[in-house]
Amino acid sequence: MGSTNRFLKDGPRVVQRSGNFPASCLTIGTSDSSGGAGVQADIKTFAAQNCYGASVVVALSAQNFSGIKGMHLVPESFVRTQLDAVGDELPISAIKIGLVPNVATIRVIGRWLRERPDVPVVLDPVAADSRGIPLLQPEMVGALCDELMPRATVATPNRFEAALLAGMEECLSLEDMEEAAQRIFKRFGCPVVVTGGGLAERSLDVLAGLDGVSHFDAPTCHRIKVHGAGCAHSAAITAGLAKGDSLREAIFHAKFYVSAAIAAAPMLDSGRGALWHGVTPNILTSSSNA
Ligand code: PXL
């Protein structure tokens, strides 16, 4: 248990502020030219949650809602320059890490985070998209496990990523999600929320942590194929932690923010769309057991 924030206590926490800045979040991830996922989704989510958003871009993706057409890496030395520029001035209250498709960059981020042990880190261990299409090479998954998972305050894998991290063949049912979440918690010591989007009539997420296993649920929206739900989910948890929420509160609010943003998603003629971040978080209601 390397850092004090590894297991956040329940109840409000004191968060860093400076001047009249709101709670500030940093996302470290890949740009999505479509604006639906990646760093763009994170910044939109932070703003919708009344947080200031900063970003360190580790790669540029050329993509639309149908898929990724190309990827261009930012040199790892320039990632470090970005991290220092942001970290030297802004009072970052919580950090989110998304898609980092480069071993050397994962190591740079790991080193930089070790210099800041007290900031909560939400790790979206992006290794496969919501259809299970791989986004990382195996050596990148290895670096993620060695460098970033042990530093995470919470990790938010989808079912495919959860199977990978848990060493399971597949993760296809609620029982599989519970098994995967518990295995990941045991292996890395970090609380984990496995997201179960598209599995059933209810969209169920499974949290495993010190208090055992619990569920967070919302109705599944079958109307549209949405892009960026996983990114928005982890970004909304980051915003909650930045504002001083407990981990459970942050996960609870994030679930309902994402459900509302999916329900409000604009859709192209193709049936593809992206989350709409103009939804107001405080009018949301829930039926979760959080
Ligand atoms: O949803 C994970 C994700 C994160 N970041 C970027 C992505 C994706 C999925 O496509 O493109 C840039």
Image: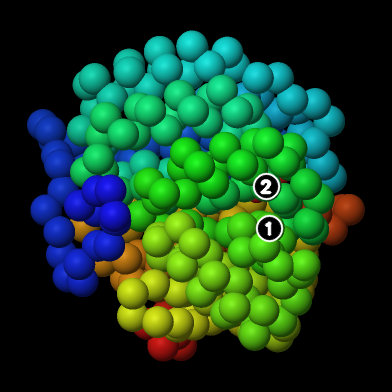
Residue 225 makes an appearance in the image: yes
Q: Tell me if the residue at label 1 has its CB under 8 Å from ligand 1.
A: no
Rendered view: 10 above or below 81: below
Q: Residue at x 72, y 50 (%)?
A: 128
Please tell me how crowded label 2 is: few (under 14), some (14-19), or many (20+) other residues with Cα within 10 Å.
Answer: many
Q: Residue at x 35, y 55 (%)?
A: 153
Where residue 182 sits in the image (x, y, percent)? 51, 74
Under mark 1, the amino acid is Leu
Image position of 42 (left or right of 94):
right
Q: CA distance from mark 1 to mark 2?
A: 9 Å
Where residue 6 sits in the image (x, y, percent)? 29, 56
Number of callouts: 2
Q: SS class of the residue under badge 1?
A: helix
Residue 47 makes an appearance in the image: no
Please tell me how crowded label 1 is: few (under 14), some (14-19), or many (20+) other residues with Cα within 10 Å.
Answer: many
Label pair 1/2, CB-CB below 8 angstroms: yes
Task: Name the residue that disc number 2 marks.
Answer: 127
Q: How is the image coloured?
A: rainbow
Q: Residue at x 32, y 71 (%)?
A: 249
**Residue situated in front as seen by the camera: 110 or 11:** 110
Where residue 26 sits in the image (x, y, percent)? 37, 36
Q: Is the C terminus in the top left, top right, bottom left or bottom right quadrant?
A: bottom left
Task: Name the residue that disc number 1 marks.
Answer: 164
Q: Is the N terminus in the top left, top right, bottom left or bottom right quadrant?
A: bottom left
**Residue situated in front as seen by the camera: 63 or 207:** 207
- Write down the quadrant of residue 272 in the picture: bottom right
